[in-house]
Amino acid sequence: MPSTLTSFSTFRRRCLTACAALAMAGCAAVGPDYVEPELTVPDAWHMRIVEQVNDGPEASLQSWWTVFNDPALNQLIERARSGNLSLQTSAARVRAARAGLAITRGERMPVLDGAGQTSRTRQSDDGWLAQVAPNNGFEAQNLYELGFDASWEIDLFGRIRRSIESAQAEYESTLETERDVMVTLFAEVALTYIEVREFQARIRYATENIAVQKQALELARERNATGLSSQLDVVQAEATLSMTQAALPDLETARTQSLYRLAVLLGEEAGKLDTEFAVATPIPRPTGRITLGLPVDVVRQRPDVRAAERRLAAQTAQIGVATAALYPEFTLSGFIGLQSRSTNDLFSGNSDFWGVSLPVNWNLYAGGRVLSNIELQKELTEQRLLEYRKSVLNALAEVKSALVAYNNEHERLAALRRATTATQEGVRLAMVQYDTGLTDYNNVMTMQRDLFQLQEQLAASEAQLDFELIALYKAAGGGW
């Protein structure tokens, strides 16, 4: 037994010595070392387009939805965080990429296989050993074996290192992709929630107008009954009322469909939110602002840009993996074990056997496939670089577009509010004048229709202002 341990120690010492010598020889990995591209972006945003965004107290970009100060929205975001199926799918992709990275990292370590065997054999008395066969013939023999086989690729030229580098970057890109899904998800939840509130506001405006138009119809009938107006006034009043009533079913349908979309975003069944939204509340108004930061900060915040950069890094490492195929591959392998015809002698000093080898595999000719693969990886890397640059341009364009749209919607909303207030007063005056006979019903009808249209536009503009603000938060990469 002591002899066996001595043999194993000798075997291990020789393996470690060979490994150390080969590891010292492989100091640099072939292929290009990755360098993150420099960002070419403006030094600052144009001051005119950030004036409206800089109003109010500052809000966190990571939890931008709190700027609306709406508890219902805050709760919906948290429910989406835990229940959305797309987000869960992205999390599963991250876990899969982490497992793939662990597999690739495992290539750095030796592979150790254990084996054992028991056999019983008998040589033929008339076979190739017939001349040495005993008079009574060969006897059956038992053979017992225990042992280990080990192999380790010596990463002299960095094939494994580049593979790990690529897998690490791919894993990091899945993390950024998950964050991008989160950014998009929270923005979609907020947009759909605002949309529900918008339709509730439009339903409220329609209901209020229906009540006013019913009063106008009753007035027209009374005046017609007393001979103060013609039947035409009654017909016009009925037509105006019916047109407004006809808008209600479409608004109810749109509200319900928005609720269904919102439920899907939360990972819940359609119709589950009906009770929660049975009572209408106003369209939420933002109560704070964000610090937009410099363009370079916004671009670096965006998960899609960060994911594109990581994909570029992963692909760059693949050039090194392909280049390593031009060089020889060294593998240190060995075996050690015990072999005996008797279990009693299996662990004795004379039963051990071992061996060490250093096979070299060098692909000297492959019909140009290796060089073509290197060229392929370089072209794929160029594609990734162009995709990264495109993602940067898209990020800048989306932020600027959101800023411009947000500012312009501010001006539009202010004008609509002034027009709505004036038209409400116009409806009141038209009704008074019609009741006193100072004007005909055509003016009342016109003012009522204008009011309903303006109120619908007002509700849409209030929601659109929120939409543009949410788009700005999303463009800035907020929410992760």
Image: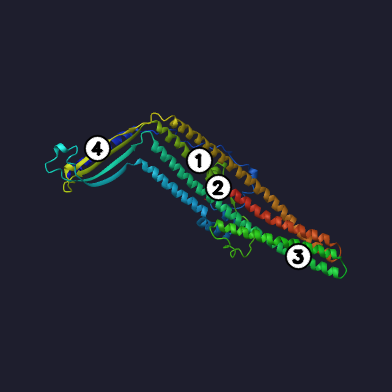
Quadrant in which residue 434 is drawn? bottom right
Question: Could you tell me which secondary element the residue under label 4 belongs to?
Answer: strand
| Residue holding disc 1 | 309
* Mark identifier at residue 477: 2
* Mark identifier at residue 212: 3
Query: What amino acid type should be assigned to the residue bearing mark 4?
Result: Gly
Q: Position of residue 118 (x, y in %)?
A: 23, 47
Sort mark 2 into few (<14), some (14-19) or many (20+) by Cα contacts within 10 Å: many
Distance, label 1 to label 3, CA atoms, is 60 Å
Q: Is residue 287 visible?
A: no
* Mark identifier at residue 437: none
Residue nearer the viewer, 265 or 364: 364
- Labels 3 and 4 touching (C-beta < 8 A): no
Residue at 37% of width from left, 43% of height from top? 106
Distance, label 3 to label 4, CA atoms, is 100 Å
Distance, label 3 to label 2, CA atoms, is 46 Å
Mark in front: 1 vs 4: 4
